[in-house]
């Protein structure tokens, strides 16, 4: 079911009865209060009428949001809901001040019919709140849910006013009349603050829920074990637009990042129905500590790099933290010191070296030349391979790496000889 169809269904089944109940309560309160000169009931009638217009404005705003016209805009027209709610909050607050000024000094009468009308209106208010709450749940609209909550608060306020009306009816004391008027006006002020506060925060891009962003971040990091570099949320009417920046391993290709981004988007949208869309950007992981292996003929920070990888006599393993060399060790390559006569074993030399470096917890290698077998195994272990220059020392190469001057290899630099002479090694 499309949003437009769902909105029409909800409007007919839930919102129409809710509005009708408010209109009936408003008319009954106002005319009985006017006819019998009961100022507090007149205020309560106007309060119910204002509630009706608040609900009507929310429905009209939702009608615009779910229209085809709103789809022309990248972020829709969801802020219309906030603008309408804020304008209504100002109107409600002003109305409360005016009614308090006009009615506080007037001592009207009180009769049992006014008490009955006020009492009967309470369950009607509750029923209207239920209709609006149900509609808000189906549409995922915070404005409708807030409107329902506002109506429930009105029931509590109306109950307090009913108590004041009853005391005034029994005692005819002026003070009970004044307290009743104050309670009725206070209900309007509370409604104004409640309607306007969330909308005001949304228009300023302030979070409505301080825990929401942390909850989303925890969901992504715990479920997919992905580091979230930054996360922002934009509340707009009944929905939220989310912006995430993910930190991925440097070996992730564009296709990998696309797959991960889709997984993150699906997980978030399935968890939070009120999120309209998720915008995801990706940046490489900022690695503050790395372990780099460099092939050498003779070990040392100031000895030049070896042009060979698998047959290099030594490997200098350097620990780098925050761009500074902290420690280094030299390991020998048993395969590099002996002549290998077996043609198949020649191809596996690079594989053995790659596995050895993995066991030494190497995260990066800098090479001049590397074959496809060693290259593929290093990648399988998540080791980043950088293109180095011959006749350079490890000290200079590490400096180039930390300053971003080296290029990451995306394919081996040479093809193995067995590919060129595959017929020689093929089975009969």
Image: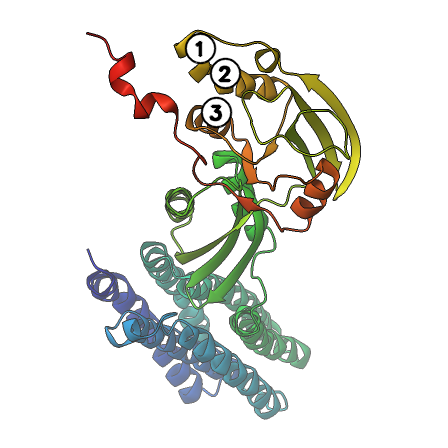
Q: Where is residue 242 in the image (x, y as percent from the top left)?
A: 47, 58
Q: Is residue 215 visible?
A: no
Marks 2 and 3, the one that precedes in the sequence: 2
Residue 263: % across, % down: 39, 42
Which residue is label 1 attached to?
A: 345
- Closer mark to the observer between disc 2 and disc 3: 2
197 vs 76, left or right, is right
Residue 252 pos. (x, y %):
46, 41
Q: Do the residues labelled 2 and 1 touch (CB within 8 Å)?
A: yes
Residue 200, relative to residue 129: is it above or below?
below
Give me the residue at 63% from left, 91% from top.
105
Task: In this rendered view, identify the residue nearer to me: 50 or 257.
Answer: 257
Q: In the image, which disc is placed on residue 207?
A: none
Residue 80 horizontal/vertical position (percent): 41, 77
Q: How many marks?
A: 3
Q: How far apart are marks 2 and 3 (CA)?
A: 8 Å
Q: Is mark 1 on a helix, strand or loop?
A: helix
The residue singled out by tag 3 in the image is 374
Compared across the picture, whether 272 is left or right of 395 comes to left
């Amino acid at each position: 079911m499309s949003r437009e169809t769902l909105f029409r269904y909800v409007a007919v089944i839930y919102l129409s009865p809710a509005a009708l109940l408010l209109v009936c309560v408003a008319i009954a309160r106002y005319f009985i209060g006017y006819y019998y000169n009961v100022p507090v009931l007149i205020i309560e009638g106007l309060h119910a009428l204002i509630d009706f217009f608040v609900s009507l404005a929310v429905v009209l705003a939702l009608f615009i949001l779910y229209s085809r016209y709103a789809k022309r805009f990248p972020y829709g027209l969801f802020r219309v809901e906030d603008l309408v709610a804020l304008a209504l909050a100002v109107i409600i607050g002003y109305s409360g001040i005016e009614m308090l000024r006009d009615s506080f000094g007037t001592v009207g009468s009180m009769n049992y019919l006014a008490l009955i009308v006020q009492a009967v209106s309470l369950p009607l208010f509750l029923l209207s709140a239920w209709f609006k709450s149900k509609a808000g749940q189906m549409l995922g609209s915070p404005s409708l849910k807030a409107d329902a909550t506002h109506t429930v608060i009105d029931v509590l306020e109306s109950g307090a006013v009913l108590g004041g009306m009853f005391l005034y009816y029994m005692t005819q004391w002026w003070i009970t009349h004044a307290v009743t008027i104050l309670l009725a006006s206070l209900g309007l002020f509370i409604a104004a603050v409640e309607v306007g506060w969330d909308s005001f925060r949304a228009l300023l891009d302030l979070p409505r829920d301080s825990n929401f962003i942390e909850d989303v971040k925890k969901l992504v990091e715990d479920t997919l074990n992905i580091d979230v570099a930054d996360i922002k949320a934009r509340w707009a009417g009944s929905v939220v637009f989310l912006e995430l920046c993910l930190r991925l391993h440097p070996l992730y290709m564009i296709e990998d990042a696309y797959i991960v981004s889709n997984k993150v988007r699906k997980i978030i949208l399935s968890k939070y129905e009120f999120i309209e869309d998720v915008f995801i950007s990706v940046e490489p992981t900022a690695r503050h500590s790395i372990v780099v292996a460099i092939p050498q003929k003779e070990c040392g920070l100031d000895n030049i790099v070896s042009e060979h990888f698998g047959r290099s006599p030594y490997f200098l393993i350097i620990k780098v933290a925050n761009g500074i060399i902290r420690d280094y060790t030299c390991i020998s390559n048993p395969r590099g010191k002996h002549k290998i006569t077996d043609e198949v074993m020649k191809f596996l030399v690079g594989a053995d070296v790659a596995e050895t470096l993995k066991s030494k917890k190497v995260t990066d290698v800098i090479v001049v030349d590397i074959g496809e077998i060693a290259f593929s195994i290093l990648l399988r272990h998540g080791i980043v391979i950088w293109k180095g220059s011959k006749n350079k020392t490890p000290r200079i190469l590490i400096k180039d790496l930390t300053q971003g001057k080296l290029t990451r290899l995306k394919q081996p630099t040479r093809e193995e000889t067995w590919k060129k002479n595959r017929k020689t090694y093929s089975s009969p």
